[in-house]
Image (tube, rainbow, N blue to C red):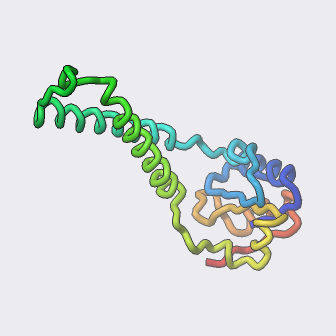
Amino acid sequence: MAEFDSATEIVVAAEKVRDAGFTKTDAYSPFPIHEMDEALGIKRTILPYLVFCGGVCGLLLGLGLQYYTHVIEYPIIVGGRPHFSLPAFVPPAYELTILLASFTAVIGMLLLNGLPRPYHPVFNVPRFNLASREKFFLVIEEADPKFDYTATKTFMENLNPQEVFDVEE
């Protein structure tokens, strides 16, 4: 793990790490850095597609439940309307669309991010608590196929960080 003083330094370092072929990397900063996803080579998430599918399922579930109730199970004509009255079915179907889409967003975000994760090995580094205040950290994981301890440590030191740390499990 390497420590940097500014967002610009860590973005440049992350681009060098990506260009060197490392894939199992992560960056920690006190605020979001929008260039970091591209700098580390992180692909776009599938979460928007999951939320869309959750919304469509909610819409179909809402319409299907109302159709089953008003047309098949209890076909009572109220106020001269047909059994399947779409304008009356829109508000509950819309609410179920929003409900299932939001549940999918929250649950999908938690699962895709691997949360909750109360422990991570980087917490063992004493200076890592500065990641939430003023410092920027770049990590190359040991699980990376290109990882070799001495070569990776030398590579990280050549990125001109403030300091390079070993992260103990």
Quadrant of the snapshot with the N terminus: bottom right
In the picture provided, is 113 more to the left or to the right than 5? left
Residue shown at the point (15%, 26%) measured from the top left: 77
In the picture provided, is 161 more to the left or to the right than 49? right
* Residue that sits furthest to the front in the current view: 79
The one of 108 and 121 positioned closer to us in this rendering = 108
Q: Position of residue 126 (x, y in %)?
A: 76, 79
Q: Is residue 132 above or below residue 64?
A: below
Q: Position of residue 84 (x, y in %)?
A: 22, 24
In the picture provided, is 100 more to the left or to the right than 38? left
Residue shown at the point (40%, 39%) measured from the top left: 95
Residue shown at the point (52%, 66%) measured from the top left: 116
In the picture provided, is 73 more to the left or to the right than 49? left
Q: Quadrant of residue 120?
A: bottom right
Q: Position of residue 13 (x, y in %)?
A: 80, 52
Q: Is residue 135 above or below residue 96?
A: below
Q: Quadrant of residue 167?
A: bottom right
Quadrant of the snapshot with the C terminus: bottom right
